[in-house]
Amino acid sequence: MSTLVISSPLEGWAAPLSEVPDAVFAERMMGDGVAIDPVGAVLYAPFDGEVISLPQTGHALGVRSDAGVEMLIHVGLETVALAGDGFIAHVCEGQRVRVGDRLLSFDLDHLAQRAKSLVTPVILTNGERFEIVRRIEGRRIEVGEALMELRLRAASEAGAAGGGEARREIVLQFEHGLHARPAATIARAAQRFAAEIAVFANDKRANAKSAVSLMTLGARKGDVLAIEAVGADAAAAARAVAEAAAQREARVTPAPALAPIAPEQPPKADELRGLCASPGLAVGVIVKIVRSEASVAEKGRGLEFERAALARARDRAKNKIEQAAQSGQASQRAVLTAHAALIDDAELASAADRLIADGKSAAFAWRAAIATQIETFSKLGDGYMAERTADLKDVEMQVLTALGVASHSDLSKLPERAIVTADELLPSEFAALDKTRLAGLCMAGGGPTSHVALLAQAAGVPALAAAGARVMEVVEGATVILDAEAGALQLAPSAKELREAQALILTQRARAAAAQGGAGDEARTSDGTRILVLANLAAANEATGAIERGAEGCGLLRTEFLFLDRDTPPSEQEQHAQYQAIADALAGRPLVVRTLDAGGDKPMPYLALADEENPALGLRGVRASLKYPELLRAQLRAILRVRPLPKILLPMVTDIAELRRVRAMLAELDSGHEIELGVMVETPAAAMLADQLAAEAQFLSIGTNDLAQYVLAMDRCNAELAGLIDPLHPAVLRLIAHAAEAARKHGRSISVCGAAASDPLAAPLLVGLGIDTLSAAPSAIPAVKARLREIRHADCRRAGEGALALGDAQAVRRLAASLGRAP
């Protein structure tokens, strides 16, 4: 194919991108191109084509040629901060333009006084399709003069010859935007296809096959992402990337506080204050982790030598991380899998390779590539994304260690009751710590949403973040008290304070041990009322562990585990095998199987659910199942084959018609068995119609998580509201009481299977409101049973009735905490 000529859009001095005083452009993170220091004040079209992006600020403009070349022209540096002052747009997005048409005008003098620089990068943003074969640099250039010549890359030419183009737009649903884990998820989806795939957001373009490139978009939840694919499998590629980007991120939802939170106190002279990254109390000795900067040689020993050295080091580091991921908990696997994707990232590898080609060593090149990305993240103005720099520092260290120029401390050799301090612990360093000797963690930097915080929470290790530089001044071996929930590290505790803290820790442990010791016994209040305590399960391998913790069966099997993270739905045979395995593990104990709860925060590609402005109010639960009846029939057939026959539970029911439709379907599939069909009470509608539902359903089960969000009008996926969405709010409790009364009227069993059932403080109130079964997280069952044994049923009733008259959730929790212990 002949070359394509790109005309200069500006009059000025053409210079290499490397001379741009901004690393994002100088290191070609946005793409390759030329910089122009303008002397003219009008920007002209560089070719015939279309305006594809023009922000309201008017500081930058994206254009696409008729041949598919995409260019970004960014007038000056950091000019977005001018908010459009000094710019006049002569075109709009979607407008056709001819070469030489006016696009923008700008006030040169005004920009010179207020912008960082007037230098204007002219960037080829789809360099995976086209390559620059000639460019003008180091001299003055006139408008319309040939600035660059491009050639279609061979792979792209072949793809274009046999393929097409596809475009999709989605609203980003990941809670904290495109950080490492979701970016890696999208990149993995894109890498399955031959098509070239680009993602656009915030006036930026990213290679969809590169997690690092995606992260530089700075996209946040709610941003619109445009996905464009070119090639033989373009349509499938765009669809797959859109589905991956439209997912919601699994995350840990904070549990409600068990007592009112005390007002924040000013720090004392002998304590440090930080943010709670993982709750808990610990007494121990300080162990400092000081990471020294590895010394690397800048000059390489030849192109082929350094390329091979970096390739081997990346492979070794990736293999080591993947091995650690396989042996870790689910949270650790998620973090380390994202790190493996970063090490394998094409953009990082390409940036390092360019430096190696310039004569740099593999270690120097890798460090410089990481540093450029870290600088890019720091400019995004997003605190959560800034915390992701720890992930990049981690993969930097992993590769440098594999190259032999850095080394890990032996983090497995900790003293007893170690409270580790560090500027900022890396995820791989936390994974290497001996958890049997680790009492706590306190970091000078970091934050409560970092990956180390997530790992600490999963391991049950108290942790503080953002405690300041003084953390590293604490003397090694000093005895301290770490109270993560109070956000304090007490540096010089008195003997009395140490005794009190240790006594409290021992009391907490003793109560936990006693609860576990009695976990296998029936749950009865102190005056003999029997309460059935079951487990919520989400996978077959959880059943045995739940029984060991005292579960008397499964009150909620979330069948989504079979339907998520796959391109096609599970077959009837596959479903039956999994359900039967769980029934076998329960050995005749009760099993309640909830039908697929699709939609909302659990998107499934093969259902082709449309993007929804508010998924919590959209097509989900039984609504989605009834829209796809064959999928529901296959699941019902699989459940009906299980022996002993489980109970069936329908999610997100709003009225009796939905129950009747599913019952009619069951009758068609199996008329020879007495099938117990129940409904979830998790919408206000179901709670208010509980009398009608209980008349026809065999049992009711209350999902307090969704019920609380709908009653309180608070999105439970909104991190800022997580502490306010409390199922013990009197408004929620009134609906629970109403549903319990309806169940009692019709002689039906009623359970709670939401988060409230796992809260030992809430359990007595629920029992007092008429709940006869609790289905809890397996880890919470011993404590829930122990709490019920301490209280008389009559006291539960009085407390439940009293709670309905209170004004807010905190008052209810104070009432619950005051319930007396049995003599």
Image (cartoon, grey):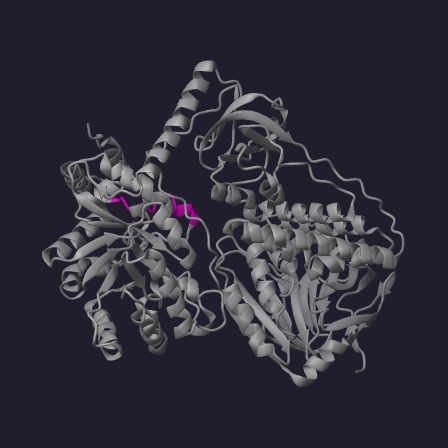
Give me the residue at 71% from left, 50% from top: 370
Q: Quadrant of residue 3?
A: bottom right
Position of the N terminus by quadrant? bottom right
Most distant residue in the bottom direction: 162
Q: Nearer the viewer, residue 73 or 427?
A: 427
* Image quadrant occupied by the C terminus: top left
Residue 84 appears at what percent x and percent y?
A: 60, 57
Quarter location, residue 624: bottom left
Can you say whether 756 is above or below 468 in the image? below
Rendering coords of residue 807 (x, y %): 22, 40
Q: Reply above or below: 324 against 621.
A: above
Asked if residue 701 lies left or right of residue 277, the reply is: left
Question: Please, is residue 202 above or below residue 610 in the view?
Answer: above
Q: Residue furthest left?
A: 745
Residue 127: say if magenta: no
Which of the pair 596/413 is nearer the observer? 413
Write the start and end of the magenta stretch as one range: 719-729
685 relative to 29 in the view: left or right:
left
